[in-house]
Image (cartoon, helix red, strand yellow):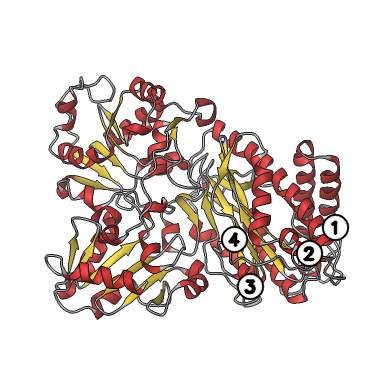
């Protein structure tokens, strides 16, 4: 790590002008949350493997900013040459730089790896001391990364209409109508999931996300896909051409953005105006280029006339989030198969924990009788680790129809590791399962008809009263949010508190948002909406046919972590009244797997919460029964037995 920092500082000094600081973001050219191996530049320089973070390297210091999901992980992974900056607790990066770097400092950035709004925010902050954001001509990290993984040539594939639900022609027509209504003549699309959704293509360029490294430009009359042409088969090329989409090399997007700015792109293609679009002649008064400031990189924005740019959230973000009926059916079916896989995993794991470790198991609260696992050498082949059991879970999923892979690295975490919110176990260093500790697994899969994400927390021994109280508080928040009814126009910021109130009553909380959208065989984290305490959650109201997760948690550093997560679909609510004629909304659960009864302190639940739990468990049995074998169904029946006890339910009111 010291050599990396020394090499970067030497390279910084050789720039013109010499750089006083270098910013290394997590994102790639498309501002992606999850990036390919060759784009993990921030991880390479810092050693921190979390998906979110920003590294700053000055002449004498190295600092890393990340959010509350990763505080504990970053503390463990950063060397003593780095200082962790906790977002929300320490000064924001732009404030720290403005206050701590000298006047007229030159701060380097690869303009392809930073969004327009981030670059502009930094420029405003730096202007106070005449500090300058310098766009480097090459990525300095790439220059010193000797063993940088090569670019992979993975094929792009068509996403069939039977799963997509809307044709490319329909999507392009709607997009062009939106462009016209906003007086725009073109849009640059940089977010990988938006390109994939618009053109009904999928790929495997980024682990866990079925996307293709590509840009798109759409005008009122033409459409382009910028991609390594080696990835495009004749079949995919024919499909694209049939929809009026011209395939160009990935790197051509830069020069084409400049041509778009000078209104020469359509003319250069020889497009007949009106053939594909909504503009019937070349006298249209649309003169703006639409750019999403959160996802478009600064390099492409710099090719445009800033006075003729519409800086506004991409219209595809909301269109993609509003699932069509085919996508909703697909998501529900995918979650049924996924729920069956999770139950099969729990049945297997319950048996293994009892046989190998002498655990009392999923249902009983007894002490561990004895460790039945023998000493070496047999021990290594028999023991269960965080990685070996997560591999088994993947195997259950892989047996299901339409399975295409995991939707993110499985968070399989025992005891103290479960307190690391986005823990990623590694085969050489992961923990062995412990019947006396909580086990949290947050996992999901990519199926052709939908993307899944589920979290359950279990204990195979005797949980403490404190662990039960914490689990039950998380469950109460999970139930409260899932049962919410709210008027049209309500955003996720307003609802976030519902999941936290039961935790707040005991002085507990968690450092992450409560819900995110889910893609339709796309990214597992999807916007533009979210349920969170963060200000961005105010931007977009929750709407019918959106998906969103419900995942409160509690994490006790050094001891354990608890999280429960289901995917919900937003639907119209059947309310007795309709104040203000607004219309009211509610949630529908589409995730099916039991909550562990022995971790619940039933005395803390209200009668209504117990009734909800019984109804949910009854649906689990009904919905999953056709997908389970006899012994698995017997296990599920026992795991979902109805409970009527609510003694002491007034506690903590």
Element at badge 3? helix
**Residue beneath the point at 74% across and 57% down:** 595
User: How far is disc 2 from disc 1 in space, using C-alphas?
Assistant: 20 Å
Task: Give the quadrant of residue 138.
Answer: bottom left
User: How far is disc 1 from disc 4 in space, using C-alphas?
Assistant: 40 Å
Residue 315 pos. (x, y %): 36, 41
Task: Give the quadrant of residue 421.
Answer: bottom right
Q: Earlier in the sequence, mark 2 or mark 4?
A: 4
Q: Which mark is residue 416?
A: 3
Left or right: 89 with respect to 263? right
User: How far is disc 2 from disc 4 in space, using C-alphas?
Assistant: 22 Å
Q: Are marks 4 and 3 in contact (CB under 8 Å)?
A: no
Dot 1: within a 10 Å radius of its alpha carbon, few (fewer than 14), some, or many (20 or more) residues? few
Residue 491 in sight: no
Per the image, the residue denoted by label 2 is: 460
Residue 433 pos. (x, y %): 71, 65
Per the image, the residue denoted by label 1 is: 643
Classify 552 as above or below 259.
Answer: below
Residue 436 pos. (x, y %): 76, 71
Per the image, the residue denoted by label 4 is: 427
Q: Earlier in the sequence, mark 1 or mark 4?
A: 4
Element at badge 2? loop
């Amino acid at each position: 790590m010291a050599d990396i920092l020394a090499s970067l500082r030497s390279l910084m000094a050789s720039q013109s002008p010499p750089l006083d600081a270098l910013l290394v973001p997590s994102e790639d050219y498309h501002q992606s949350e999850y990036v390919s191996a060759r784009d993990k530049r921030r991880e390479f320089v810092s050693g921190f493997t979390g998906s979110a973070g920003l590294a700053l390297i000055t002449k004498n210091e190295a600092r890393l900013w990340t959010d509350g999901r990763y505080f504990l992980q970053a503390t463990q992974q950063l060397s003593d040459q780095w200082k962790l900056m906790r977002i929300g607790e320490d000064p924001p990066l732009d404030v720290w730089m403005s206050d701590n770097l000298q006047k007229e400092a030159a701060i380097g950035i690869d303009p392809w790896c930073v969004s327009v709004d981030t670059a502009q925010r930094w420029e405003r902050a730096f202007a106070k001391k005449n500090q300058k954001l310098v766009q480097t001509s090459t990525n300095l990290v790439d220059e010193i990364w000797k063993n940088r993984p090569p670019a992979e040539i993975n094929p792009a594939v068509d996403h069939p209409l039977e799963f997509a639900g809307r044709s490319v022609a329909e999507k392009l027509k709607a997009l062009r109508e939106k462009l016209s209504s906003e007086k725009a003549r073109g849009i640059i699309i940089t977010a990988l999931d938006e390109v994939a959704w618009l053109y009904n293509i999928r790929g495997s360029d980024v682990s866990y996300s079925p996307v293709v490294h590509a840009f798109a430009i759409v005008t009122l009359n033409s459409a382009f896909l910028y991609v390594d042409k080696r990835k495009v088969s004749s079949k995919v090329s024919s499909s694209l051409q049939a929809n009026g989409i011209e395939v160009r090399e990935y790197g051509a997007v830069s020069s084409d953005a400049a041509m778009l700015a000078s209104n020469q792109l359509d003319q250069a293609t020889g497009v007949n105006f009106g053939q594909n679009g909504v503009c019937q002649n070349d006298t249209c008064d649309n003169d703006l280029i639409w750019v999403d400031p959160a996802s478009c990189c600064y390099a492409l924005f710099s090719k445009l006339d800033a006075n003729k740019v519409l800086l506004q959230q991409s219209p595809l973000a909301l269109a993609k989030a509003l699932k069509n009926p085919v996508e909703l059916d697909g998501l529900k079916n995918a979650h049924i198969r996924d729920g069956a896989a999770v139950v099969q995993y729990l049945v297997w794991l319950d048996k293994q924990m009892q046989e190998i470790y002498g655990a009392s198991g999923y249902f009983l609260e007894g002490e561990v009788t004895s460790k039945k696992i023998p000493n070496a050498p047999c021990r290594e082949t028999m023991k269960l680790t965080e990685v070996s059991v997560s591999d088994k879970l993947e195997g259950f999923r892989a047996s299901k129809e339409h399975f295409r892979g995991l939707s993110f690295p499985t968070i399989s975490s025992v005891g103290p590791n479960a307190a690391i919110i986005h823990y990623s176990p590694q085969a050489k260093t992961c923990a062995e399962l412990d019947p006396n500790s909580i086990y949290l697994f947050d996992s999901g899969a990519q199926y052709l008809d939908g993307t899944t994400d589920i979290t359950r927390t279990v204990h195979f021994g005797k949980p403490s009263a404190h662990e039960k109280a914490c689990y039950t508080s998380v469950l109460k928040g999970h139930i409260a949010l899932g049962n919410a009814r709210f008027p049209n126009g309500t955003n996720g910021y307003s609802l976030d508190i519902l999941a936290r109130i039961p935790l707040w009553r005991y002085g507990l909380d968690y450092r992450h948002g409560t819900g995110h959208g889910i893609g339709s065989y796309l990214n597992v984290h999807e916007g533009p909406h979210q349920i969170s305490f963060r200000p961005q959650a105010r931007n977009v109201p929750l709407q019918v046919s959106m998906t969103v997760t419900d995942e409160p948690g509690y994490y006790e550093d050094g001891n354990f972590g608890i999280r429960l997560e289901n995917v919900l679909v937003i639907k119209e609510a059947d309310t007795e009244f309709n104040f203000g004629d607004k219309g009211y909304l509610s949630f529908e659960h589409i995730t099916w797997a039991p909550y562990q009864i022995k971790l619940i302190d039933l005395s803390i639940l209200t009668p209504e919460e117990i009734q909800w739990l019984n109804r949910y468990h009854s649906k689990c049995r009904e919905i999953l029964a056709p997908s389970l074998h006899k012994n698995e169904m017997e296990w599920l029946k026992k795991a979902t037995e109805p409970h009527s006890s609510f003694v002491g339910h007034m506690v903590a009111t």
